[in-house]
Amino acid sequence: MHRYYFDHNATTPVAPEVLRAMTPCFSEVYGNASSIHYFGQQAKLRLEQARRQVAGLLGCEPAEVVFASGGTEANNLAILGTVRQAARQRRHVITTAIEHPCVLDACRQLEKEGVEVTYVRVGSDGMVSPDDIRAALRPETVLITVMYANNEIGTVQPIGEIAAIAREAGVYLHTDGVQSTGKIPVDVQELGVDLYSLSGHKLYGPKGTGALYVKKGTLLGPILFGGRHERDRRPGTENVSGLVGLGEAAELARRGLPAEMPRLAALRDRLERALEERIEFAGVNGKGSPRVPNTTNFYFDFLEGEAMVIALDLKGMAVSSGAACSSGSVEPSHVLTAIGLSDERARASIRFSLGSQNTEEQVDALVEAVEGAVAHLRKLSPTVGSRQ
């Protein structure tokens, strides 16, 4: 049986070029990048090359790149590090209802510390309105944090417009760019953000690596303590091998994006057309909104998404019923309920996220597998009679 992978928003395979770049760091360039001897300085050279490569992908200065252990840490550093640093008695943060759990939970932690947080709603199209962000502003607002691309439905938020509002109000803007980096062009200067997070394993790099762009002049305090690394912003011995891999992945993304974007968009459209034509009571969540080219989220009424994931896995197709970090949750996706889906429809939704190894033949095989699985599961469904 062939096995095909359609869950690239959960994680991506490490690119061969990334693995080759990392390998010497385990056996030859094994020094601590903070050591002043030859071995340490060789590691430091590799680390700083990786920083330049990440900066090249984001369109910023290398000195504005802070390395971290992944998107979760980068997001926490951005949110907690700026808000706790704000020298105000009353502090207020604006975010949205469809953020990744690591952003929402960081905001909930701030609420425990006395910070007020506004969770702006989104429309049924999965988009946040810049006007709603503007309306949520208060004199005590210190941070706006809005994701660039949603991890479940792929909608791309109007960050440029929100940045203009933030600038006008003198408020920092952080963007969770974990699901946009490597999928659409990112220029942090053009976007106008103050902080931007990314994760290595979402763009064919290794797990346990990430970065935070911190615009020069942004007041950011550490959330970990113990050393002077990363210009006093993130202590701890740097993961040189992993960050070299992240740098190489960033370089590959920068070079490959112009060709890969239209290729993935064509595959995504092929998948959507076929499923909509061949399966009744199904549709795309967030269709019609700007989306990253690799992501589509489908509802299939009258079945359970978890059962669908298992049925497709048995046919050799790896897909997801929501964010990987939320698997095992009995609650429906907070993103899908935020865009107005009923709990039942949210639980009947599946995410397909395409990547570099997917082909038209694989997409066609996926369509066949989905059609068969839906037919089988609907026969077993106790709610199937309600569609008569």
Image (cartoon, helix red, strand yellow):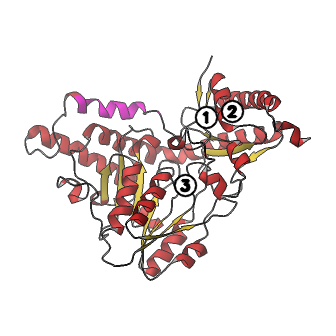
The prevailing secondary structure element of the residues shown in magenta is: helix
SS class, disc 2: helix
Residue 22 among those drawn in magenta: yes
385 relative to 62 in the view: left or right: right
Q: Amino acid at mark 1?
A: Val
Q: Nearer the viewer, mark 3 or mark 2?
A: 2
Pick whichever of labels 2 and 1 is earlier in the sequence. Answer: 2
Disc 3 and disc 1: Cα gap in Å? Answer: 19 Å
Pick whichever of labels 3 and 1 is earlier in the sequence. Answer: 3
Q: Position of residue 25 (x, y in %)?
A: 24, 33
Q: Nearer the viewer, residue 287 or 223?
A: 223
Q: Which residues are magenta?
A: 13-26
Using the image, determine if residue 47 lies above or below residue 363.
below
User: Residue 154: in sight, yes or no?
Assistant: no
Pick whichever of labels 3 and 2 is earlier in the sequence. Answer: 3
Residue depicted at 40% across the width and 46% down the height? 250
Using the image, determine if residue 63 lies above or below residue 178.
below
Q: Amino acid at mark 2?
A: Met
Q: Nearer the viewer, mark 2 or mark 1?
A: 2
Residue depicted at 76% across the width and 30% down the height? 377
Q: Nearer the viewer, residue 262 or 247?
A: 247
Residue depicted at 76% across the width and 46% down the height? 283
216 relative to 185 in the view: left or right: left
Q: Position of residue 312 (x, y in %)?
A: 66, 28
Q: Nearer the viewer, mark 3 or mark 1?
A: 1
Using the image, determine if residue 17 lies above or below residue 57.
above
SS class, disc 3: loop
Q: Amino acid at mark 3?
A: Ala
Residue for badge 3: 149
Residue for badge 2: 308
Q: Are marks 2 and 1 in contact (CB under 8 Å)?
A: yes
Query: Residue 319 has which mark?
Result: 1
